[in-house]
Image (cartoon, rainbow, N blue to C red):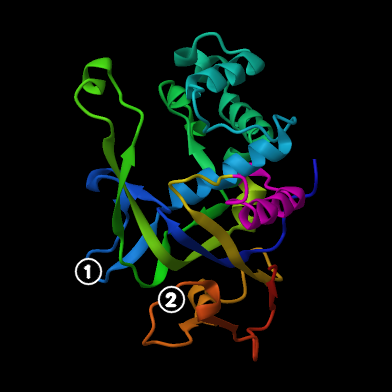
Amino acid sequence: MAEVIHNRYDFVVLFDVENGNPNGDPDAGNMPRVDPETGLGLVTDVCLKRKIRNYVEAAKENEPGYRIYIKENVPLEQSDKEALTYVGIDDIKTAKKKNPDADSRLRDFMCSNFFDIRTFGAVMTTFMKGALNCGQVRGPVQLGFGRSIDPIAPQEVTLTRVAITTEEDALKKKTEMGRKFIVPYALYQAEGYISANLARKVTHFSEDDLNLLWQAIINMFENDHSAVRGNMAVRELIVFKHDSELGNAPSYKLFERVHVARKDPHTPPRSYSDYEVQVDTENMPQGVTCERKI
């Protein structure tokens, strides 16, 4: 296993969508998520983590140490039972009494085998039933919501379909109607945090994991294209590296150095070239460096 990270990181991701729905809201008929007070578009952290997980799963294809815990059509209990078998626990309710270090052994197994637990942490309810403290693992990497730079104007597009669902309906009509929502264009900004302290104490998130995370963020939309999402791409990954485990400056002061503005405030944006992105690297806090990875 590669060396555990020793530096704290803060990072900013800029990504955009063109004629697509970046993150539908199931409580609003799958409309793009919107802050009702400002009209700014939203993309949840859960959505972004899903893209990262999907990329790692595709890139590593169940390579040892890089499996994915939160995945489609795989019950979490299945992976939990694998850990219990490895540690030699038959009855989870009495595990703590028979094996005082069961907590740490289970946690270490899950962190060493599953990339997303090592990265984002996890709540493993199977273990919590036995009052095991390892049931909740706090990951060193955390992401916030993506928020659009400007208010978005979701549009509902009506579609016609020549394929009729039932034979009975086919006798009555030649087409069926459908709809989907799109955002003509929007640029989103999301912030993230990486704690070297939690990496050392809890999950052993390594330098190799960090490099894979950067790669996954940069490419998280490249293998996830669909008709619903339209054209989505990561445009910028701006990384602030601290030369210490606990950091040398508050995150918000570093994020404030990233300035994104529309070139023409009177024209609705329709491409990334309509924006100007500047990063203030003058007089950086001592012990902090900035790198634009895209």
Which of the 4 quarters of the picture holds residue 19? bottom left
Above or below, 11 against 76 in this view is: below
Residue, disc 1 = 37
Q: Nearer the viewer, residue 99 or 93?
A: 93
Counting from the top left corner in percent of width and height, residue 164 is at 31, 26
Counting from the top left corner in percent of width and height, residue 257 is at 54, 82
- Residue under the point 48% across and 15% down: 92
Above or below, 178 against 207 in this view is: above
Counting from the top left corner in percent of width and height, residue 247 is at 62, 69
Q: Earlier in the sequence, mark 1 or mark 2?
A: 1
Alpha carbon separation for disc pair 1 and 2: 21 Å
Residue 216 belongs to magenta span? yes
The kind of secondary structure element at disc 2 is loop
**Magenta segment, which residues?**
202-223
Q: Which mark is residue 269?
A: 2
3 left or right, relative to 274: right
Q: Which mark is residue 128?
A: none
Q: Residue furthest right?
A: 2
Main SS, magenta residues: helix
Label 2 is placed on what type of residue?
A: Pro
Above or below, 8 against 211 in this view is: below
